[in-house]
Each structure stands twice: as C-alpha cells, then as structure tokens.
Amino acid sequence: MKRLSVKLNLTAAAPLLDIVKAAADGLCDRPAVPLCPDVIEEDLREILLEELLHGQRSDLARFLSLFDHDFFSDGTVVFHESNAEPILRACAAVRLHLWSRYLKELTPEQWNSESADPEDLDPAVKSPQLCFFFLTSLQELILAHLTGAAPVGEGEVSF
C-alpha cells in the first residue's frame, strides 16, 4: 500500500489548521456546494442533502483526525491510499468554503501563489488564502502519489 508522509512546520501549520477546523464547523450543516433547487425534485432534495452532508462531515472528520497528538509531537501527517479520497474531498470542501466566504473577490494576480508574498496579502484574506494554498498543495501531493507520479512505497515531503 502506498503511503505519503508529509512533514509540516508546526508554527506555520497550526494557524492554518484552526482555519480548517472553523471551516469544517461551518460546513457541518451546509454543503460546500449548494444544491440547485430547480433541478432536483423537492422530495429527493432532502434525501440528497442529508446524504451529501453525512459524507461531507465524515470526510472532514477523517481529515481533521490526521492532526492528532502524534502530529503535534513531530509535525508529520501520513496519508494512505485508504484515506486519500476522503481527504481530497475534505480539502475541496474547505477550499470551496474559503473561496465563497473570503476569497471570491480576489484578482487573478492575487491568486498567483508563486508571486504572492504573504506580507503583501490583504490582512482580511491573508490567513484564508494561505490556508487555501496549503490545502491545494496537499491535494496535489496526494494526487501525484496516487496516480503513480510518486515512487511506489513510502514517500516523505516537508513543508
């Protein structure tokens, strides 16, 4: 089974995890992507919404469980093939939440992570944008690892 270990700087990661936790709390009773009420029949909408929220809560809980006591002792989080898909979905849900709540008014220049100096970011969106970039990087690492772009076996990456 493939395994990916990611070593994070605890000082940098802790505030980002606070944002992820707050977003997960906000997503507890609402989907990251709203349902289209005029496309889905009313009787099915309630069932679909409950299934969607159940899956979203489960994915977010699985993602947050990776950042446990062991993580805070050495800064390492481990992804396996068995938890990759729920983690990808959880990251996507939080990114959608951050975008819709804080980031949708940013210009394309402000979105360019390669040229974004954290000190130049608007303080109102600095933390959500850095969290968005962090989650994007995690998703990219997981996708590369699962698609065979990463070596088979164990991998380690540091942030």
Image: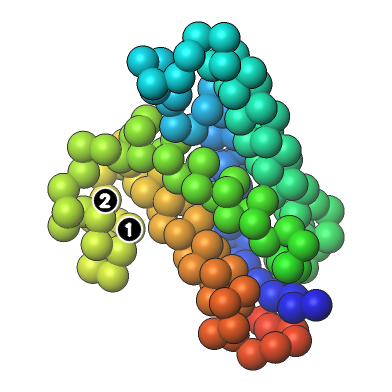
Q: How is the image coloured?
A: rainbow
Residue 20: image tag = none
- The vertical placement of 147 against 79, above or below, is below
* Element assignment for label 2: loop
Question: Who's the residue at 50% across and 48% down the image?
Answer: 92
Residue 64 in sight from this viewpoint? no
Q: Quadrant of residue 21?
A: top right
Residue 48 against residue 23 in the figure, above or below: above
Q: Is residue 22 left or right of residue 76?
A: left
Marks 2 and 1 sit apart, C-alpha to C-alpha, by: 5 Å
Say whether marks 2 and 1 touch (CB < 8 Å).
yes
Label 2 crowd (10 A; few <14 / some 14-19 / many >=20): some
- Residue 121, numbered label: 2
Position of 87 relative to 6 (above/below): above
Q: Position of residue 87 (x, y in %)?
A: 64, 54
In this view of the protein, which residue sits in the foreground, 119 or 104? 104
Q: From the image, which quarter does the C terminus lie in?
A: bottom right
The N terminus: image quadrant: bottom right
Asked if residue 122 lies left or right of residue 133, the reply is left
**Residue tagged 1:** 118
Say which amino acid is labelled 2. Answer: Leu
Q: Position of residue 40 (x, y in %)?
A: 45, 19
Q: Residue at x 59, y 83 (%)?
A: 148
Residue drawn where x is 54% and y is 34% of the image: 23
Please provide percent x and percent y for residue 3.
74, 76
Residue found at the far bottom of this picture: 151
